[in-house]
Amino acid sequence: MFSLQVPVRTGIPISSAISSSKGAEEAGHACELISLYDRNIGFCRACYACFRTGECVLHDDMAKILKKMQEADVLVIATPVYFLTMNGMLKTAIDRFLPKWQDLGGHDVWLIITGHDSRKGLQLAGDELTAIFRNLGNEIKGIIWGDNVWQKGEVRDTEAMEEACRAGRSIY
Ligand SMILES: Cc1cc2nc3c(=O)[nH]c(=O)nc-3n(C[C@H](O)[C@H](O)[C@H](O)COP(=O)(O)O)c2cc1C
């Protein structure tokens, strides 16, 4: 099983992610694309009720997403860079990992990071996501950088798309 988490509905990062998942499908793996943009995900209230119950007090789409993440072998996390860091939708979802944070390790993780800036400008987002997913007990298999892209679809003509496909095919 192979799961994708994408914070925007359409556009550059999702294009890269789909490319990656297509490669994985060609290699015979079931892929699921989750667009956070289309989900109902509230902010963590920091009430810590989940420390007692293992469940969040908010009854939205996050519990289902966490279950899918736990069941997946491979996670692909895609984000556009907004103000030097990950997109807010992705960070909101990550904060909601709290009820299950001890059960979200053991995955191979690929990161897809896009932005109009050069690779250097996207580095912070890569470093942060690497630290977060490593800290949960996962292995970062690679980062696909969609640098120097601004408009939707622009990434289609870049090396990042080929890299995403290669990454998809290399899984297992
Ligand atoms: C609010 C906002 C902030 C942004 N900040 C950055 C930034 O700090 N660095 C960067 O390289 N790109 C930045 N961008 C550009 C996006 O990262 C880039 O256009 C994105 O990869 C496009 O993906 P999308 O069309 O799927 O949303 C920003 C875009 C928006 C909307």
Image (spheres, rainbow, N blue to C red):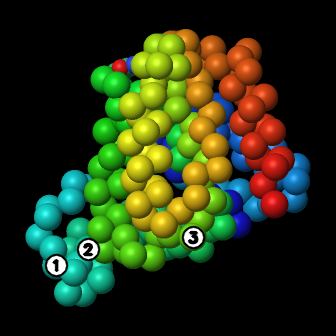
Foreground tag (3 vs 1): 3
Tag 3: Cα neighbours inside 10 Å, few (<14), some, or many (≥20)? Answer: some
Q: Where's residue 156, x and y in %?
A: 70, 20
Q: Would the CB of label 1 be found within 8 Å of ligand 1?
A: no
> In this rendering, is residue 45 above or below 148?
below
Which residue lies most toward the left here?
47
Which element carries disc 3, helix, strand or loop? loop
Q: Residues within 10 Å of mark 1 (few under 14, many from 20)?
A: few
Position of residue 59 measured from the top left corner of the image (x, y, whole percent): 28, 70
* Whether residue 90 is situated above or below residue 85 in the rendered picture: below
| Residue that badge 3 annotates | 106
Q: Residue at x 41, y 34 (%)?
A: 125
Type of amino acid under label 1 = Ala
Q: Earlier in the sequence, mark 3 or mark 1?
A: 1
Viewed as shown, does residue 96 lie left or right of 108? Answer: left
In the picture of the structure, the residue carrying the numbered disc 1 is 49
Quarter the N terminus occupies: bottom right
Give me the C-alpha separation between circle 2 and circle 3: 22 Å
Name the residue at 15% across, 74% down. 48
In this view, the residue in front, 157 or 125, is 125
Label 2: few (<14), some or many (≥20) within 10 Å?
many
Q: Helix, strand or loop at disc 1?
A: helix
Q: Residue at x 63, y 34 (%)?
A: 144
Q: Nearer the viewer, residue 35 or 94?
A: 94
Q: Position of residue 18 (x, y in %)?
A: 68, 40
- Determine the CA span between mark 1 and mark 2: 7 Å
Q: Amino acid at mark 2?
A: Cys
